[in-house]
Image (tube, rainbow, N blue to C red):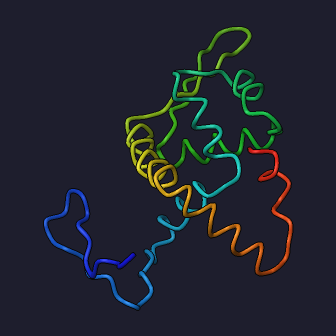
């Protein structure tokens, strides 16, 4: 399969050339912090549970299997700081807190949809590459791949 020498970026009128040069990543700390957050083990799992609407902390803890209370609190705090999640505190007894995706959180989900579509559309090529890699090294695939997860 031949690669095109340029790509059209949705929403951008100009074409971007593909070269042998590394793609420059943003150098601002804020962008790197955001990218590190979305690459975290738990972030996408928490966001996935907020797609259905508002959730309380303990509800999220039950839905995100394996996450500790401390890690969930830190993940929610980071998502709130980045503007993806809104935290609403209700001053009642006992206190109640709800979490929900913000508008930017919903737009982030749209971007994830494109990544998901890419993975689905290219899954056979990706699986074939994994098999070739494993065969060349004569290794067993990771256990989670064997179970079909």
The picture quadrant where one finds residue 125 is bottom right
Give left or right: position of 132 versus 145.
left
Foreground pick, 124 / 84? 124
Q: Residue furthest top?
A: 93
- Which percent across, then down, holds residue 20? 40, 91
Above or below residue 96? Residue 22 is below
Q: Residue at x 54, y 24 (%)?
A: 88
Q: Position of residue 22 (x, y in %)?
A: 45, 86
Residue at the (48%, 42%) spot, across then down:
84
Looking at the image, the residue that sits furthest to the bottom is: 20
Left or right? Give the position of 111 relative to 98: left
In screen coordinates, is 60 left or right of 9? right
Q: Where in the figure is residue 25, as x and y percent of width and height?
A: 45, 77
Q: Is residue 102 above or below residue 143?
A: above
Say which quadrant the C terminus sits in. Answer: top right
Q: Looking at the image, which residue is at 67% across and 45% down?
A: 75
Q: Quadrant of the N terminus?
A: bottom left
- Residue drawn at point x = 75 percent, y = 23 percent: 58
Q: Above or below — where is 89 with respect to 33?
A: above
Quadrant of res 135: bottom right
| Front-lying residue, 123 or 77 | 123
Residue 81 placed where, x, y %?
54, 47
How many marks overall?
0
Between 9 and 102, the one nearer to me in the picture: 9
């Amino acid at each position: 399969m031949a690669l095109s020498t340029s790509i059209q970026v949705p929403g951008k009128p100009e074409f971007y050339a593909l070269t042998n040069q590394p793609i420059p990543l943003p150098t601002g700390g804020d962008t790197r912090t955001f990218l590190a957050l979305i690459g975290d083990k738990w972030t996408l799992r928490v966001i996935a549970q907020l797609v259905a609407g508002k959730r309380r902390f303990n509800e999220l803890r039950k839905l995100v299997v394996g996450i500790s209370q401390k890690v969930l609190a830190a993940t929610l705090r980071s998502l709130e700081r980045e503007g993806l999640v809104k935290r609403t505190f209700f001053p009642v007894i006992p206190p109640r807190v709800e979490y929900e995706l913000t508008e930017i959180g919903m737009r982030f989900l749209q971007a994830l949809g494109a990544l998901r579509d890419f993975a689905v559309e290219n899954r056979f090529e990706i699986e074939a590459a994994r098999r070739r890699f494993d065969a060349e090294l004569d290794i067993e695939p990771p256990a989670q791949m064997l179970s079909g997860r």
